[in-house]
Image (spheres, rainbow, N blue to C red):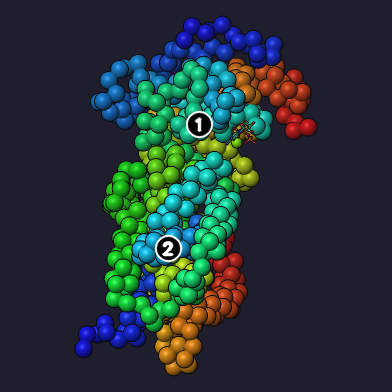
Amino acid sequence: MADTAPPASPPDGVPPDAPPEAVPPDAAGPQAATSETVGPEDGAPRERDVTLRMEHASIAYGDVPVLEKIHGIVHPGEAVALIGPNGAGKSTLIKAILGLVPVVRGRIEVLGRTPALARRDVAYVPQADTLDPDFPVSVEQVVMMGRYRKIGWLRRPGRADRTAAAEALEQVGLTQRARHRFGTLSGGQRQRVLLARAIAAQPRLLLLDEPFNGVDAVSQHALLEAISVLKGRGASVVISTHDLAIAHLACEEVCLLNRYQFGFGPAEEVLTPECLRATYGGHALELRGDRVIVAQS
Amino acid sequence: MNWFDSAMHRALLEAALVGAMGGVVGVFVVARRLSFFTMALTHATFPGIVIAALLGINLLLGGGVFGLLIVAGVVMLGRGRGQDFTAATGVALAGGFALGVVLISAQSGFTKDLTAYTVGDILTVDTFDLATTAAVTCVVLLTLAMLGKELLLRAFDPDGAAAAGLPVVLLDLALLALVEMAVVATVPALGAILTLALLVGPAATARLLSDRLALLFPLAAAIGVACGLAGIWISMVADVAAGASIALLVGAVFAVALLLRRGVRRPRRSTALSGAD
Ligand SMILES: Nc1ncnc2c1ncn2[C@@H]1O[C@H](COP(=O)(O)OP(=O)(O)OP(=O)(O)O)[C@@H](O)[C@H]1O
Ligand SMILES: [Mg+2]
């Protein structure tokens, strides 16, 4: 708690990250949507405004932390991009927010609860290419999986579940492919199906692990559209990506990661050449003074 | 005379039961790529059977209890390295079989009992065996029906299942235990080695014929039952071993399905291409 002094470990030239604590009051749409989705059991008004709170969190698979001193807040209707080189810990942070990897110091809170207790309101979109393309499951079955938690044990999907699944599939523009086998779709389309599955779960926090890898312009557009609809309904979104342009497009906040946090805040403040160079070590190249390209040496 | 007094009737019923159960369980075995695990189970339950023979208790019970220990061991060993049970299974296979051999070589005299066990003899199945198989079939099919959607999510997207808050270790334990029960119930009829045919073959064949999960279960069960019944009939008519006839039929049906799919595939592919925009 008291350890607000910047740690000695991150390289110099990094501005101390101080995420703005105050909620921008001008965001009328998300606020309205939030008060509607928040249940009466979440009493404290403070928690209403925060979907994800990370307080100097260190995350470890075993004894040695993979991520240290992660600190930041995500509000309803906001999206944050996790940016960093391979092995930076982006997937690890997402798994910690899901409660699948332990937080060994500090803490992570989702909707005022521990990650494991908040899973009902969190949806996770894995990378489509991590799933078995030969698996005998149809597109609509995959989307229905997003409803399983709400359906509960020993019960079958009802009409409300089928409606929610159909609407979610509609949102990503793949209604005509509902009966096709998941593996027969292209990589980008599979990614959209997985997003539809997350949408069907009606989450308040959506976590996407590199959703734009190997995705063409059409699918990318469909994904971005669907994400912005979710944000409009008051959901918060965390997206790990290597693509700075997409971070600019889809997210108002950026978190720069490489074992430590090299910046957390509004995209225009954090995506500076200095911060990127610090995050990526020597592999960041500068173009025309204001644009930065990251080279994977 | 009671219908069950005929060895032929008992054999037919037993074959239908293990055929249906093997087909349905097999859909999960194939989808989760547990063929190797299933093969290992048939061998790793061996020491349990030897111990049961030594103690003079029911062989099925001995194999079943020992198999459950193997299942728990495989799940625990497999946890450390993601979702792959392969390495842990290999250890269980070698270790279990070795233990059985050691126990056997320490004790001489009952090898006759055990050869029946490795090859199986469906025509000597008694009413008690039949009742056991029927009970196990009911338990296995009911459990699969109840946990179906959770097992499906776990099989398709392991991380997603954990992220959704499902108790993935318990689900894995449940599925492997169901496979184990199916193996132990089938072994007296088909023998340790031929059991694999019924637990993998019908489901793999169904998978060749259909992409739709809902169809796979009835299809695999039907193939299993048909091969079981036809195998018994062939063994009667041609006077050959019943278990081997069933296993051979399963293989033949799989080969035919493979050829059919080859033939069907080409036209289907071209329509898919012309249908795409
Ligand atoms: N299951 C695991 N057990 C132990 N260490 C792990 C595990 N998974 C990842 N790590 C380590 O954690 C660090 C961060 O990995 P992570 O997968 O989070 O990186 P990433 O930013 O997602 O990289 P990429 O861009 O390649 O996806 C790496 O050094 C990796 O070796
Ligand atoms: Mg990653």
Between residue B267 and residue B179, name the one nearer to us: B179
Between residue A77 and residue A41, name the one nearer to us: A41
Q: Percent from the top left, x then y, of residue B275?
A: 55, 66
Measure the C-alpha gap from mark 1 to mark 2. 47 Å
Residue under the point 42% across and 65% down = B53
Q: Secondary structure at mark 2?
A: helix
Residue wearing tag 1: A101
For the residues tagged 1 and 2, is the chain the same? no
Q: Secondary structure at mark 1?
A: loop
- How many marks do you count on the picture? 2
Q: Is residue B237 left or right of residue A254?
A: left
Residue B135 versus residue B267 in the image, above or below: above
Residue neighbourhood size for the residue with mark 2, other residues' Cα within 10 Å, grouped as few (<14), some (14–19), many (≥20): some
Question: In the rendered image, is residue B29 in sight?
Answer: no
Queried on whether the Cβ of the residue with tag 2 lies below 8 angstroms from ligand 1, the answer reads no
Residue under the point 43% across and 78% down = B121
Residue under the point 35% across and 82% down = B12
Which three-letter amino acid code belongs to the residue tagged 2?
Leu
Q: Percent from the top left, x then y, of residue B192?
A: 49, 69
Chain designation of label 1: A
Between residue B232 and residue B159, name the one nearer to us: B232
Which three-letter amino acid code belongs to the residue tagged 1?
Val
Queried on whether the Cβ of the residue with tag 1 lies below 8 angstroms from ligand 1, the answer reads yes
Question: In the rendered image, is residue A93 in sight?
Answer: yes
Residue wearing tag 2: B54
Residue under the point 59% across and 40% down = A212
Residue neighbourhood size for the residue with mark 1, other residues' Cα within 10 Å, grouped as few (<14), some (14–19), many (≥20): some
Q: Quadrant of residue A253?
A: top right
Chain designation of label 2: B
